[in-house]
Amino acid sequence: MYKVTGIDPTGRVLTFACGTDLQALDKVRELMARGFRDISVADPKGQRTNGTAFERSVGLEYD
């Protein structure tokens, strides 16, 4: 399971669970559009990646 974490515009830290890398990519893009900051993604192995870097690495596979 992928875990997407970010800070919303009011300052709350929120975490979202995603089953696949594609769902996590969609969530990262959604959070960016909604004004979240400090977005990161933890993959099933626990490795954390910055949201922008994750978007670039996964986006290449699906674009």
Image: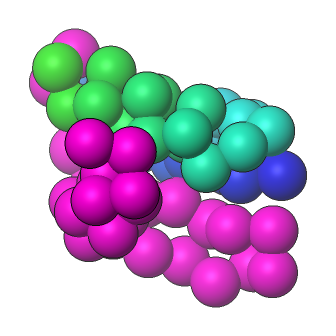
**Which quarter of the image is occupied by the C terminus?**
top left
Q: Residue at x 63, y 66 (%)?
A: 42
Q: Position of residue 48 (x, y in %)?
A: 54, 77
Q: In this view, does 5 lie to the left or right of 21?
A: left
Q: In this view, does 45 lie to the left or right of 10?
A: right
Q: In this view, does 25 lie to the left or right of 21?
A: left
Above-or-below relation of 44 to 61: below
Examine the structure image and report whether residue 39 is included in the region drawn in magenta: yes
Q: What stretch is highlighted in magenta?
A: 34-63
Q: Position of residue 31 (x, y in %)?
A: 32, 27
Which residue in the rendered view is the most extreme toward the top? 34
- Residue 8 image-quadrant placement: top left
Q: Position of residue 14 (x, y in %)?
A: 55, 34
Whether residue 8 is visible here, answered yes or no, is no
| 30 and 37: which is toward the camera | 30
Above-or-below relation of 40 to 45: above
Identify the image's colour scheme: rainbow, by chain, secondary structure or one colour: rainbow
Examine the structure image and report whether residue 28 is included in the region drawn in magenta: no
Q: Residue at x 44, y 75 (%)?
A: 49
- Residue 56 image-quadrant placement: bottom left
| 21 and 7: which is toward the camera | 21
Q: What is the number of callouts on the image?
A: 0
Q: Where is residue 34 in the image (x, y as percent from the top left)?
A: 22, 16
Q: Which residue is drawn at 39% across and 45% down?
A: 62
Above-or-below relation of 59 to 30: below
